[in-house]
Image (cartoon, rainbow, N blue to C red):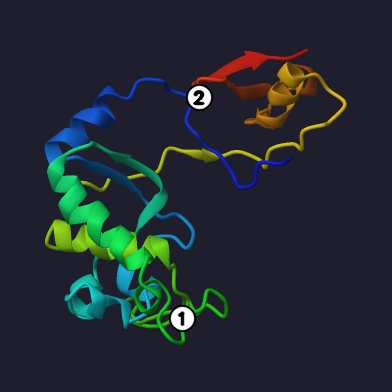
Amino acid sequence: QETDGPWMVHRSNDMSEWSRRAVKSGGVLTWPLMKPQLLPTAALTHPNMFTFFHTPKHNYDFHQMSDASTVLVYNLPTVHKELMKPWVGCALTHNCISPIGAQDTGCRYDKKPLFRYSGCHHYDESAFNVALGVMFDQDTRPYLAPTNPFTIASKTHPISDDLPEEDSRDLSSREILSKDVPTSHEDQILRQPDGIPLTRQVG
């Protein structure tokens, strides 16, 4: 068994400021997409997706793309109705989430002006950002944090069938966060059974 995909890790456990901002915005806080960096939603979204949301593409020419893998949301009726429902609705509609001609290869991020469609569609992430734009009238200031503080940890290790259950869980969830310290004292992150991450020193 193997857990695919990176983990988004932040060394601080203080989320009070993030929570305050999310509540103030109406229940949502996002961080900017870093790769490709600082491109508008229009550049990373197939033009036909906007039709599903009944909004013109040019509304997103200067709309900063958020990273859909790091999101803080509150369980509020407005979030259900204005963000989650249209986002999921698009994801369940093939012509919305994957319009004819959409692809994620052959990207041209150097097109001028930058809001021209790059030829690369971000699928669920694009739908998330279009829904956010509709929810906030294309104004990212209430919900978009200025920088992304998260670190992408390495891919998790496979679980060995020869290890006891407890040791297997420990091995599968170990993530190396820093390469700038001696190998015998690398910071590692473990995910406990209840889902709460912790760090420890290993020697």
Residue most toward the right? 162
Q: In the figure, is residue 99 to the left or right of 201?
A: left
Q: Is residue 39 visible from the viewing direction of this image?
A: no
Q: Is residue 196 visible from the viewing direction of this image?
A: yes
For this rendering, which residue is in front, 163 or 26? 163
Question: Residue 195: horizontal and vertical position, in percent?
Answer: 50, 24
Q: In the figure, is residue 21 to the left or right of 99?
A: left
For this rendering, which residue is in front, 195 or 120? 195
Badge 1 density bin: few <14, some 14–19, many ≥20, Cα 10 Å: some
- The residue tagged 2 is 195
Residue at screen point 16% across, 55% down: 82
Circle 1: residue type: Ala
Element assignment for label 2: loop
Spatial separation of the CA atoms under disc 1 and disc 2? 36 Å
- Mark number, residue 76: none
The vertical placement of 162 against 140, above or below, is above
Question: Residue 2: horizontal and vertical position, in percent?
Answer: 71, 41
Circle 2: residue type: Gly
- The residue tagged 1 is 102
Element assignment for label 1: loop
**In the picture, which quadrant includes the N terminus?**
top right
Question: Residue 100: horizontal and vertical position, in percent?
Answer: 43, 86
**In the picture, which quadrant includes the C terminus?**
top right
The vertical placement of 180 against 148, above or below, is above
Question: Residue 149: horizontal and vertical position, in percent?
Answer: 42, 38
Q: Earlier in the sequence, mark 1 or mark 2?
A: 1
Question: Looking at the image, is mark 1 or mark 2 nearer the viewer?
Answer: 2
Residue at screen point 14% across, 56% down: 136
Badge 2 density bin: few <14, some 14–19, many ≥20, Cα 10 Å: few
Residue contact between numbered discs 1 and 2, judged by CB atoms under 8 Å: no
Q: For residue 59, what is the image quadrant?
A: bottom left
Residue at screen point 65% across, 29% down: 173
